[in-house]
Image (cartoon, rainbow, N blue to C red):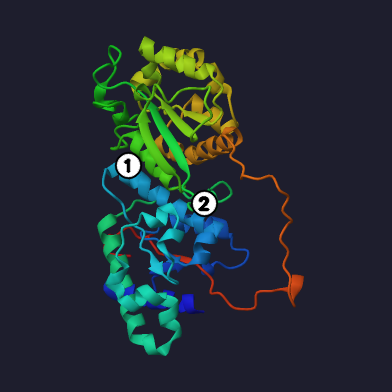
């Protein structure tokens, strides 16, 4: 009830601040989906077209896998938009429903650059739920909602994030990741040449002064793939470290237990260098299931298409194990990912496969002492009949509608 009131109040302000025609939907809240309507498809369509995403922060919000999936679906659009335009697309406007301590925020939420104090000190200490429930704070509530609506309209006008393809919720991961007390590391390594050591005849437009400048999806993408990958990995609540294969000679020691899972991005043109090819061959000879290989392949790159049989055969001869290792998604990623959209869809599966293999092969550090400890049991006057009887408000997302692409609308 209280979330619905907030949504109506926000929509009223947005209508007043824009030229939306009377009766047009200013936004969408996922509670509006009726039973049997096909909630997954409807929600996917809205998240693929809305222009601003407004998560209602609370402890329960970040414990919800579905809320994490919704955040992930929208974040992918922002990352793809930034890759195409090479401009930040900060289109997530968080609202404090219940204040959450910073140490309890998952990485994607913690990294948001947002000044909540601009909406009032009472808003920061009590959240919208506290303001809306107590009449004494009615004025503070009105101010906070008005300022939030202004921010939503401003972001919608300035960002202009493009519509995307609806996400399949059966496959979408949660942006909040698995509950963990420690940050989850993920290594992103790039095996690619620079524009200074390209094979004869190779177009330098796809390369830069460093292997990390490699941009296989040029000209659609304006950003190097290493940094797009870093953003995608971080959107899955991992701490990403990016480096070049050429600089990580000491890192590749298969006799040592892994220190982190890894995604290795390989440019097939990189194998024209005999030394790099020999090191990749030695790398493949080691058993490293915690390393997932992804081979970006631009179907609009005419040079690569013309020499595809040769380049593919060289890679399969150099890294036969990695080409056949892992689950179906990993094998597909190693055979070639033809577009930036396809890269964004398959990378979460590759990251998850690397993380699972890392957990199976990493060094184990059991707690000291081998004494037996009994399983804890709930005791007391209520025993196993204990039940939660207090009410906790639902935690929802809502997002201003974007079916109309006019920048003056929200």
Give the total number of marks visible in the rendering: 2
Q: 203 and 294: which one is in front?
A: 294
Crowding at mark 2 (Cα within 10 Å: few <14, some 14-19, many 20+) = many
Q: Is residue 18 visible to the viewer in this orientation of the structure?
A: no
Horizontal and vertical percent position of residue 218: 31, 32
Horizontal and vertical percent position of residue 213: 29, 30
Q: Is residue 60 left or right of residue 126?
A: right
Kindly indicate the quadrant of the structure image that contains residue 384. Answer: bottom right
* Residue for badge 1: 83
* Residue for badge 2: 174
In the image, residue 207 sits, relative to residue 19, either above or below, namely: above
Q: In this view, does 82 lie to the left or right of 183?
A: left
Q: 197 and 30: which one is in front?
A: 197
Horizontal and vertical percent position of residue 304: 37, 20
The structure residue drawn at horizontal position 31% and vertical position 52%, both measured from the top left corner, is 89
Q: Is residue 84 left or right of residue 184?
A: left
Separation of marks 2 and 1 at Cα, in angstroms? 21 Å
- Going from the N terminus, do you reach mark 2 or mark 1 first? 1
The structure residue drawn at horizontal position 50% and vertical position 17%, both measured from the top left corner, is 319
Q: 129 and 332: which one is in front?
A: 129
Q: Is residue 213 visible to the viewer in this orientation of the structure?
A: yes
* SS assignment at label 1: helix
* SS assignment at label 2: loop
Looking at this view, name the residue that lies furthest to the bottom. Answer: 136
Horizontal and vertical percent position of residue 390: 60, 78
């Amino acid at each position: 009830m209280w979330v619905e009131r907030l949504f109506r109040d926000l929509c009223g302000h947005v209508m007043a601040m824009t030229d939306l025609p009377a009766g047009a939907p200013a936004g969408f809240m996922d509670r509006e989906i009726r039973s049997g309507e096909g909630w997954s498809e409807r929600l996917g369509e809205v998240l693929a077209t809305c222009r601003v995403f407004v998560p209602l922060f609370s402890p329960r919000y970040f414990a919800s896998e579905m809320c994490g999936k919704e955040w992930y679906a929208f974040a992918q659009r922002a990352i793809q938009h930034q890759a195409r335009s090479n401009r930040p697309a900060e289109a997530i406007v968080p609202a404090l429903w219940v204040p959450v301590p910073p140490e309890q925020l998952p990485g994607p939420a913690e990294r948001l650059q947002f000044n909540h104090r601009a909406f009032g000190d009472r808003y920061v200490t009590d959240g919208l739920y506290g303001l809306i429930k107590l009449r004494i704070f009615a004025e503070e509530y009105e101010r906070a909602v008005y300022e939030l609506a202004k921010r939503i309209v401003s972001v919608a006008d300035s960002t202009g994030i493009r519509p995307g393809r609806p996400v399949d919720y059966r496959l979408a991961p949660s942006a909040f990741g698995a509950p963990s007390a420690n940050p989850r590391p993920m290594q992103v390594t790039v095996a690619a040449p620079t524009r200074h050591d390209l094979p004869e005849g190779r177009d330098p437009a796809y390369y830069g002064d460093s292997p990390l400048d490699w941009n296989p999806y040029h000209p659609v993408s304006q950003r190097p793939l290493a940094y797009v990958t870093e953003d995608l990995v971080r959107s899955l609540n991992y701490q990403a470290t990016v480096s070049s294969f050429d600089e990580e000679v000491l890192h590749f020691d298969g006799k040592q237990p892994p220190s982190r899972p890894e995604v290795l991005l390989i440019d097939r043109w990189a194998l024209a260098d005999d030394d790099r090819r020999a090191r990749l061959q030695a790398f493949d000879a080691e058993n490293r299931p915690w390393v997932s290989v992804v081979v970006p392949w631009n179907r609009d790159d005419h040079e690569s298409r013309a020499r595809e049989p040769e380049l593919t055969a060289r890679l399969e001869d150099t890294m036969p194990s990695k080409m056949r290792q892992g689950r179906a998604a990993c094998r597909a990623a190693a055979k070639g990912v033809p577009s930036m959209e396809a890269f964004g869809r398959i990378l979460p599966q590759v990251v998850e496969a690397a993380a699972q293999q890392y957990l199976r092969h990493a060094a184990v550090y059991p707690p000291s002492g081998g004494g037996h400890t009994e399983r804890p049991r709930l005791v007391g006057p209520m025993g196993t009949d204990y039940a939660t009887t207090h009410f906790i408000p639902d935690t929802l997302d809502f997002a201003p509608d974007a079916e109309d692409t006019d920048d003056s609308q929200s």
